[in-house]
């Protein structure tokens, strides 16, 4: 029960106490339901590692629910919740629903936003999450509330990235495999406007390495060569193992000239040049130190079909093999 009392004194000096009693059972029950609903929301938010937010557009007050700092490694900032595609100032929406039909009638067309994005974490690495929000408007069309949530998708994004990497990478060397490399190179050749170069790299007499040293040593040679190629080439270049002891490099913007000659000469020396010169013992054992042959084709005026450029590079590699191996040769296509 709720009761209100008021003490008064009449003209004769007699005091009276007026009291009103009201049944508050329903209000207490609703308050308890609200408490339980908020408790449920907090528990589910904590269990799902989501972050909810509720922003009042008129006042700019933002309420964030969930362990944001534990999730992202820093305090929340306005830019985490107010994105350019939504509105010019802080606003947001929170969900407390059993039946969403009344709420959905207040949501205007194209008001819902749902997309995947990331923000730098404490270590600078991207932390992936799903941004979802809804804007509620008043009768005049002005924004009243902007409510949303940040769903934890880091693990899913990491798994997807790992699966994609596994599908695109060569299991032995970690370079792009043939399918992934060709897909990227073909796309680049359709859109690239600069001169570009396709380089085919081959280990000389690789079968002899396996026969003399065994397949584990052959694998060592391939992995060593893969590391060498990645170090010589730029990050923007596509470096791949396309089968056996054959490697493929696509270098956009690399045209015939002194710079290209230096790169090709460096590649042709290979990772084992120092070992061949000094007969150096590596890891307390003698490792194979094969030579490397390089055939390259430079396309001066893309776009160009991959098959045409690859045929030119492969033919050039064949000429290098015929000329004695352990060197490079470049063919220029106008």
Image: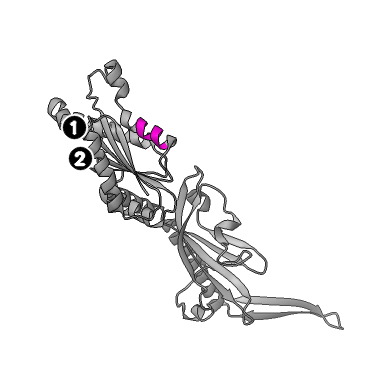
Q: Is 263 within the magenta? A: yes
The kind of secondary structure element at disc 2 is loop
**Residue 10: image x %, image y %?**
84, 82
- Front-lying residue, 220 or 265: 265
Residue denoted by label 2: 244
Q: Is residue 96 above or below residue 293?
A: below
Q: Is residue 28 above or below residue 292?
A: below
Relative side of 252 to 328, left or right = right
* Main secondary structure found in the magenta portion: helix
Q: Residue at x 34, y 51 (%)?
A: 185
- Front-lying residue, 95 or 161: 161
Q: CA distance from mark 1 to mark 2?
A: 9 Å
The kind of secondary structure element at disc 1 is helix
**Residue 61: image x %, image y %?**
64, 63
Task: Please say if the residues under marks 1 and 2 sit with CB atoms less than 8 Å apart.
Answer: yes
Residue 72's disc number: none
Residue denoted by label 1: 206
Snapshot quadrant of residue 147 = bottom right
**Residue 60: image x %, image y %?**
65, 64
Of the image marks 1 and 2, the number of the one nearer the N terminus: 1
Q: Residue at x 52, y 50 (%)?
A: 69
Scheme by which the image is coloured: one colour
Part of the protein shown in magenta: 260-266
């Amino acid at each position: 029960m709720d009761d209100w009392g008021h003490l008064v004194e009449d003209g004769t000096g007699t005091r009276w106490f007026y009291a009103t009693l009201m049944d508050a059972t329903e209000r207490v029950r609703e308050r308890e339901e609200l408490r339980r609903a908020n408790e449920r929301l907090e528990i589910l938010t904590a269990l799902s590692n989501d972050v909810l937010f509720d922003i009042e557009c008129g006042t700019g007050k933002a309420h964030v629910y969930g362990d944001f700092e534990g999730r992202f490694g820093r305090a929340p900032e306005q830019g985490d919740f107010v994105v350019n595609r939504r509105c010019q100032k802080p606003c947001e929406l929170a969900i407390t629903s059993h039946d969403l039909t009344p709420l959905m009638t207040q949501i205007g067309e194209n008001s819902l936003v749902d997309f995947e994005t990331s923000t730098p974490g404490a270590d600078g690495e991207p932390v992936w999450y799903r941004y979802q929000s809804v804007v509620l408007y008043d009768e005049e069309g002005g924004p009243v509330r902007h409510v949303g949530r940040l769903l934890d998708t880091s693990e899913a994004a990491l798994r997807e990235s790992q699966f994609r990497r596994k599908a695109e990478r060569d299991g032995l060397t970690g370079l792009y495999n043939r399918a992934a490399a060709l897909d990227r190179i073909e796309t680049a050749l359709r859109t690239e406007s600069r001169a570009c170069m396709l380089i085919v790299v081959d280990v000389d007499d690789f079968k002899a390495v396996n026969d003399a040293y065994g397949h584990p040593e052959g694998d060592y040679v391939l992995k060593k060569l893969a590391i060498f190629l990645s170090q010589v080439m730029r990050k923007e270049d596509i470096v791949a193992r396309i089968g056996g002891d054959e490697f493929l490099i696509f270098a956009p913007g690399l045209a015939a000239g002194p710079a290209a000659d230096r790169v090709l000469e460096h590649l042709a020396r290979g990772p084992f040049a120092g070992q061949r010169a000094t007969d150096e013992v590596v890891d307390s054992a003698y490792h194979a130190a094969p030579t490397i042959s390089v055939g390259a084709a430079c396309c001066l005026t893309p776009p160009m079909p991959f098959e045409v450029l690859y045929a030119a590079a492969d033919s050039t590699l064949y000429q290098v093999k015929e000329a004695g191996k352990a060197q490079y040769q470049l063919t220029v296509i106008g």
